Amino acid sequence: METIPGVGRATAEIIVAETGADMGRFRIAGHLASWAGVCPGHHESVGKHKSGSRRRGNRWLGAALGTAAMAASRTRETTYLGARYHRLVPHLGKKKALVAIEHSILTAVWHMLTDGVSYQDGPCPKAG
């Protein structure tokens, strides 16, 4: 997990301690992200999109992911996560872009632990 930009040894230990390293209980990566509280909020009524706050999740995991996301966002254009953060900031704002990076980090962790693969910098080959 330390190969993910922004994730150091302490953050990796917190992720394993809080999630339990067995991803069998989370059928898809979205379930893990929802449990951790890093899913984007969604509130729509009569076709109007209103502000949606993120869920309350595991606060220790959320704090560790927040630190990792801030570190990954400072990598500028050299990594996928840094480039994604800087691409999202003009549209979403800084805080929502950080939550998106937290979600990406946790999704990468789920794939690493479920499929037994190492982290590869770049967009997911299975996506779209």
Image: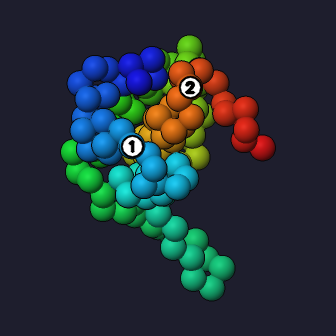
Are dots 1 and 2 in contact, CB under 8 Å? no
Position of 77 compared to 109: left or right? right
Name the spot of residue 15 as percent of width and height, x first.
31, 37
Position of 78 compared to 39: left or right? right
- At horizontal 36% and vertical 62% (from top left) the residue drawn is 55
Q: Height in image: 92 above or below 76?
A: below
- At horizontal 44% and vertical 27% (from top left) the residue drawn is 73
Name the spot of residue 121 as percent of width and height, x first.
59, 21
Residue linked to disc 1: 22
- At horizontal 36% and vertical 24% (from top left) the residue drawn is 7
Q: Nearer the viewer, residue 119 or 22?
A: 22
Instruction: Give the mark nearest the N terminus, 1 or 2.
Output: 1
In the displayed image of the protein, which residue is found farthest to the right? 128
SS for tag 2?
A: loop
Position of 10 compared to 107: left or right? left
Q: Which class describes the residues within 10 Å of circle 1: few (<14), some (14-19), or many (20+)? A: few
Residue linked to disc 2: 117
Q: Height in image: 21 above or below 72?
A: below
Q: Can residue 39 be seen in this snapshot? A: no
Q: Height in image: 89 above or below 54?
A: above
Name the spot of residue 45 as percent of width and height, x first.
57, 82
Amino acid carrying mark 1 in the image: Asp
* C-alpha distance separating marks 1 and 2: 14 Å
Position of 37 compared to 58: left or right? right
Amino acid carrying mark 2 in the image: Val
SS for tag 1?
A: loop
Q: Which of 113 and 52 is in front in this view?
A: 113
Please identify the quadrant where the N terminus is shown: top left
- At horizontal 47% and vertical 63% (from top left) the residue drawn is 41
> What coloring was used for the rendering?
rainbow
Q: How many labels does the image show?
A: 2
